[in-house]
Image: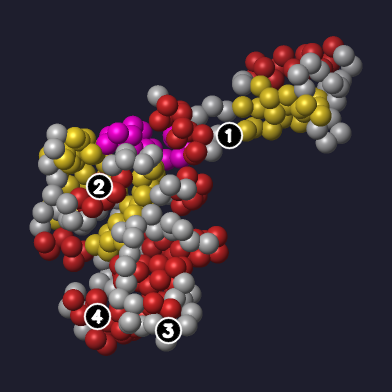
Amino acid sequence: MIVADNLGKAYDGFAAVDGVSFSVEEGEIFGIVGPNGAGKTTTLKMLAGLLEPSSGGAEVAGLDISDPEMRRHIGFLPEETPLYENMTPASYLGFFADLYGVPPSVAAERAEDLLDSLDLEHRDRRLGDMSKGMKQKVAIARSLINDPEVLIYDEPTSGLDPVTTKEVHRFVRDLGDGGRSVVFSAHNLFHVEHLSDRVAVMREGRVAAEDTVEGLRDSFGQTQYRVHVTVELPGAEPGDGDYVLVVEDMEGVEAVRSEAESLGGRVADIRTMEQSLEDIFLSIIER
């Protein structure tokens, strides 16, 4: 549903995006992460048809991103989403539905269904009187009022409280399960790790790594082992009634086992410590 092919964007000789290629399948949630200035937002704006690439190209929903018809097949959510604050959610969504040519009767029912799915309360309020989380839910509903196949979200949960963030993530997961393709950027790597089917790590305008979180962990992560023993060994930390050593591999585990047994003790437990996406991200960026 999304194919980026050597996509690039330069400003006065500076490559903000430099040869980015990836694909997002139907029903897949694809996360893009990277430090500030990595090119995430620029990439998403090109995919949404808001910026013209300097090189390469992309197709979204089977259409070239230069084709105006492509925009009818996407829902785009920028990081900053100013709303018409004198409108109510219903009038706001009805206004955008009209721009897309959605019949009023269809639009009204679709708007109600979307707001129900997003658990939006106080729908009779002016948007200007709503909290940031409520406004973001309306903005997400707006991105879906034209019933698009592809959704492009830039920091969809930025600045939201934990409860609203969880609700938005649940909704985005449901979109993927319903067959829509979702590509989104985020700074909170914990959220990306638990929401994405695949992740691209961008650095200096390029994709430095792309895979599932498990694939990235296998390629760039480092598994450690917490070995719990019944006797105190050099370098061990006190545990819950035992002592704990952290080692890098199974050879280290066996060395601890031998040392514990030589002192009349034993290994009580071994626990695997897998690195988080944040740890992997830092490893990739530092390389």
Residue 101 is labelled as none
> How many other residues sit within 10 Å of disc 1, few (<14), some (14-19) or many (≥20)?
some
Q: Tell me if label 4 and label 2 are in contact, CB under 8 Å.
A: no
- Per the image, the residue denoted by label 4 is 95
Relative image position of residue 83 (x, y in whole percent): 32, 72
- Per the image, the residue denoted by label 2 is 42
Q: CA distance from mark 3 to mark 4?
A: 16 Å
Residue 214 within the segment the image draws in magenta: yes
Q: CA distance from mark 1 to mark 4?
A: 48 Å
Mark 4 or mark 2: which comes first in sequence? 2
Residue 165 appears left or right of 239: left
Label 1 is placed on what type of residue? Glu
Q: Tell me if label 1 and label 2 are in contact, CB under 8 Å.
A: no
> How many other residues sit within 10 Å of disc 3, few (<14), some (14-19) or many (≥20)?
some
Residue 274 is labelled as 1
Q: CA distance from mark 4 to mark 2?
A: 27 Å
- Per the image, the residue denoted by label 3 is 125
Relative image position of residue 190 (x, y in whole percent): 51, 47
Q: Is residue 223 above or below residue 234?
A: below
Residue 35 appears left or right of 57: right
